[in-house]
Amino acid sequence: MELTESQTALIAEKINEAGLKYYPLKEELLDHLCSATEEKMTEGVSFPEALETLSELFKEDEMKVMEKETLSLLNSKSEFMKKLSLLTLLVVLLTFTVTWATKSSEKAIPPTDPPSILPIAEYFSTSPFGKRMHPVHKVERMHTGIDFRASMGTPVLATSDGKIVKVQRIRTGYGNKIVIEHDSIYKSLYGHLSQVNVEVGQIVKKGDIIGEVGSSGAATAPHLHYEVIENGRKVNPEGFISLRTE
Amino acid sequence: MYLCIMYSKELLKGTLKTIVLQLLSDNGRMYGYEITQRVKELSEGELKLTEGALYPTLHKLEADGFLSTEKVKVGGRMRKYYRLTPVGRTDAFRKTNEFRSFTAMMEKVLNIKPRLT
């Protein structure tokens, strides 16, 4: 038993009279009422009679209550949404914490300007960056830094803020050596020291005394071998400092 | 809540979702009126689901992602069918199992025999 279009329209009219506003519910109730009516009519009840008994079930108030209940349930946050918003909150917190942690570790190696001061206050002369005859090995070699001839024990200074990333005490090569990481781009190296005042991991400020001039390693006289390393490549330190002109 | 003379509201509260999810699990897709009729039939008339309880619950379950819907034109009107989503299927299984173990436990607890001393 299926309702005619006009019978369906009549039931739709009844629902409209109840003043429902939420369309998905109205549409569904129409099907519900029509289905119930059809069942009654299959039992042999006439359409008007069926409608009469059913309208008892679908009082205007009840429909309104149902609509209100539906909408309030839909507006209340679902468990899933609660979990989702909790998760979002966690992610935001985590991101914040990570950002904060990154920032505070950046504080450990603060972004600085490149090593910009002389690594030594007093010196006699310099030997420049570039190809030269090696004083010990007596062959032409690339000199990857500047040598500062100075008295034994002259203070050696950190040329910019940074973190000590390497301290080496060997008898060959650069001898007693310090490497400072200034930021993600620049490092500086100090070789042939007689004394090292810092240790790996230590944070230093520009101008801090980190060691003393010596002749440790492959050196013929007390001097400071100073290098600037830019993105892992040794560059001419003269580009960063102004040497005293004699 | 449901219209039901035999059981108290308190007892029935919270079982509506279990019933709806389990029915859909057994029958695939169903529409609202069909659900009320099936409940009446299965409970031999003892449990009569009111529309006022059913539709808000269906809409809520749909909004929570447990049910998906499809509409089919029937005569001069649209019929909305409900079906379990994978999440809904898992939840139906969980709720039914929970309820079964609950009733089994209640049975044990209430079935206390007088102590033979």
Image (cartoon, rainbow, N blue to C red):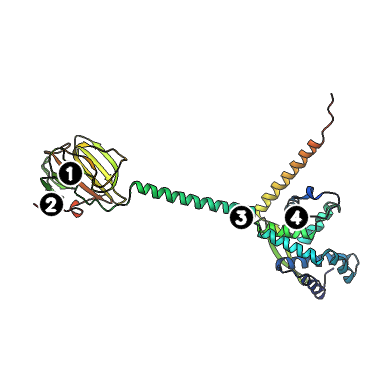
Q: Which residue is mark 2?
A: A244
Where's residue B5, x and y in %? 86, 52
Gap between marks 2 and 1, in whole Å?
17 Å
Check disc 1: other Cα within 10 Å, few if <14, some if 14-19, many if 20+: many
Q: Which residue is mark 4?
A: B27
- Please name the amino acid that badge 3 sits on: Met
Answer whether labels 4 and 3 touch (C-beta < 8 Å): no
Q: Is residue A238 above or below residue A198?
A: below
Q: Chain of mark 1?
A: A
Answer whether labels 2 and 4 touch (C-beta < 8 Å): no
Whichever of labels 2 and 1 marks the residue nearer the N terminus, that label is 1
Which of the two discs, 4 and 3, sits closer to the camera? 3
At mark 4, the secondary structure is helix
Gap between marks 1 and 3, in whole Å?
64 Å
- Please name the amino acid that badge 4 sits on: Asn
Tell me if I can see residue A173 in this picture.
no
Whichever of labels 1 and 3 marks the residue nearer the N terminus, that label is 3
User: Does A81 sit left or right of B2 as displayed?
Assistant: left
Which of the two discs, 4 and 1, sits closer to the camera? 1
Q: Is residue A112 above or below residue A32?
A: above
Which of the two discs, 2 and 3, sits closer to the camera? 2
Q: Chain of mark 3?
A: A
At mark 1, the secondary structure is strand
Tag on residue A225? 1
At mark 2, the secondary structure is loop
Gap between marks 2 and 3, in whole Å?
70 Å
Gap between marks 2 and 4, in whole Å?
93 Å
- Please name the amino acid that badge 1 sits on: His
